[in-house]
């Protein structure tokens, strides 16, 4: 069983409509796949389409677990993070997944494209492109050896660039540079 995971608010802006539609198509061809949706629905702000909600509720291979205080158990059960958001500030979810040794499929948006190196620790697809998302998910299923390499790269890449001490040192250097101007 190959498990994809999404962590975030279940809303349109996070690309959930495209994700669910792409996954349902993938699951028809690859019934040994599963999708975990970890996060709350927001019915009053940017809700997913009614068809998306229906697919989530009726597809046996999709499990929506709601909001969770601790998402680590869901990363542990998963093989690939899928984070098809339309826009982000800095997506902590992608860093968390990498720290948990998960390769990621992300959209080509600020934040995500700085964390994921296409082909090294994940794949980058255009935002709002259901077909590209489907192809990336299919690639992860069809190329287990390459996916395993991405898995092995995920944590070291995140640790080398986003470990707190390193980030703090970068901030100190930046502030020193600004103050010396």
Image (cartoon, rainbow, N blue to C red):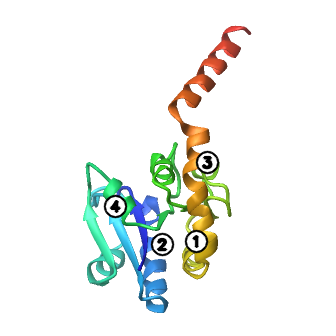
Residue 1's image quarter?
bottom left
Residue on which disc 2 sits: 18
Q: Who's the residue at 50% across and 56% down the image?
A: 101
**Residue 136, image x, y percentages:** 59, 73
Q: Position of residue 89 (x, y in %)?
A: 52, 43
The residue that disc 3 covers is 157
Q: Looking at the image, is mark 4 or mark 2 earlier in the sequence?
A: 2
Q: Return the residue at label 4.
A: 74
Please state which of residues 98 and 89 is positioned toward the viewer in this rendering.
98
| Disc 2 from disc 3: Cα separation | 28 Å
How many residues crowd around disc 2 within 10 Å: few (fewer than 14), some, or many (20 or more)?
many
Q: Tell me if residue 26 can be seen.
A: yes
Mark sitting earlier along the chain (2/3): 2
- The answer for how far apart the CA atoms under marks 1 and 3 are is 26 Å
Element on which disc 4 rests: helix
Q: Residue at the spot x=46%, y=72% of the render?
A: 19
Which mark, residue 25?
none
Tag 1 and tag 2, C-beta contact below 8 Å: yes
Q: CA distance from mark 4 to mark 3?
A: 21 Å
Residue linked to disc 1: 129
Total marks in image: 4
Within-10-Å neighbours for mark 1: few <14, some 14–19, many 20+: some
Of badges 1 and 3, nearer the viewer stands 3
Front: mark 2 or 3: 3
Q: Is residue 27 above or below residue 126?
A: below
Looking at the rendered image, the disc whose residue lies closer to the viewer, 1 or 4, is: 4
Query: Rounded to the nearest whole Å, what is the CA distance between mark 4 and mark 2?
Result: 21 Å
């Amino acid at each position: 069983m190959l498990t994809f995971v999404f962590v975030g608010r279940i809303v349109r802006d996070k690309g959930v409509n495209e994700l669910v539609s792409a996954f349902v198509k993938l699951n028809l061809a690859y019934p040994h796949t599963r999708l975990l949706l970890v996060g709350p629905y927001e019915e009053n702000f940017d809700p997913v389409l009614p068809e998306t909600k229906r697919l989530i509720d009726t597809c046996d291979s999709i499990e929506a677990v709601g909001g969770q205080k601790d998402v680590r158990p869901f990363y542990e059960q998963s093989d690939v993070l899928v984070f098809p958001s339309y826009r982000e500030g800095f997506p902590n979810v992608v860093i968390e997944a990498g720290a948990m040794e998960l390769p990621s499929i992300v959209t080509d948006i600020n934040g995500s494209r700085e964390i994921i190196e296409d082909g090294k620790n994940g794949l980058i697809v255009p935002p709002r492109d259901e077909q590209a998302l489907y192809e990336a998910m299919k690639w992860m299923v069809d190329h287990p050896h390459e996916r395993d390499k991405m898995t092995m790269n995920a944590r070291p890449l995140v640790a080398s660039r986003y470990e707190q001490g390193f980030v703090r040192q970068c901030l100190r250097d930046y502030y020193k540079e600004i103050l010396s101007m």
